[in-house]
Amino acid sequence: MVPERSIAIYVLLSIFTFGLWGLVWFFQMAGDIGRLRSDGKPSALIDLVLIICTCGIWAIVIGYMWGDKLNGGMRERGLPVNENLPVITLVLSIFGLQLIALVLWQIELNKAAVA
């Protein structure tokens, strides 16, 4: 269903490539959430264009939306859900800590991968 990814390697790659690997991770994660939900949503390309067009404001919206979509996919699969995830990642996004939000989403996706 979704692959398990090494969070430490992805974080280090994101830091050493000055965020470029973070974009790859962003697209991979969108695909994983879409597969988990079985509807192909969210669309990383549309979200990336909206982030650029809104000068980063859409990243705050994604902070909540993706956490909520991830929880919905986990619920559909009968997996345990972190109810606080959307709010936590929203707050992290408000403060510009999207990398930590990616880590939290990947932790949940890794749980789905091993289940």
Image (spheres, rainbow, N blue to C red):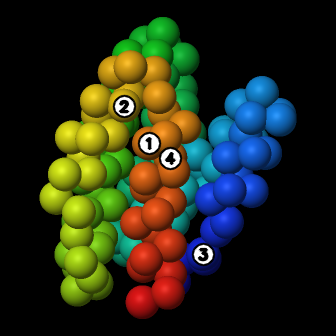
Say which amino acid is labelled 1.
Ala
Q: Residue 57: percent from the left, percent from the top?
A: 38, 16
Find residue 102 and name its label: 4
Q: CA distance from mark 1 to mark 3?
A: 17 Å
Residue under circle 2? Answer: 92
Q: Secondary structure at mark 1?
A: helix
Q: CA distance from mark 1 to mark 2?
A: 6 Å
Q: Mark 1 touching mark 2, by CB under 8 A?
A: yes
User: Is residue 34 at all visible to an observer of this figure?
Assistant: no
Mark with earlier residue (4, 2): 2
Mark with earlier residue (2, 3): 3
Q: Secondary structure at mark 2?
A: helix
Residue under circle 1? Answer: 101
Q: Residues within 10 Å of mark 1 (few under 14, many from 20)?
A: many
Say which amino acid is labelled 2.
Leu
Residue under circle 3? Answer: 4
Q: Mark 1 touching mark 3, by CB under 8 A?
A: no
Q: Mark 4 touching mark 1, by CB under 8 A?
A: yes
Tell me the quarter of the picture where residue 92 sits.
top left
Q: Residue 114: percent from the left, percent from the top?
A: 49, 87
At 54% from the left edge and 17% from the top edge, which residue is drawn?
A: 52
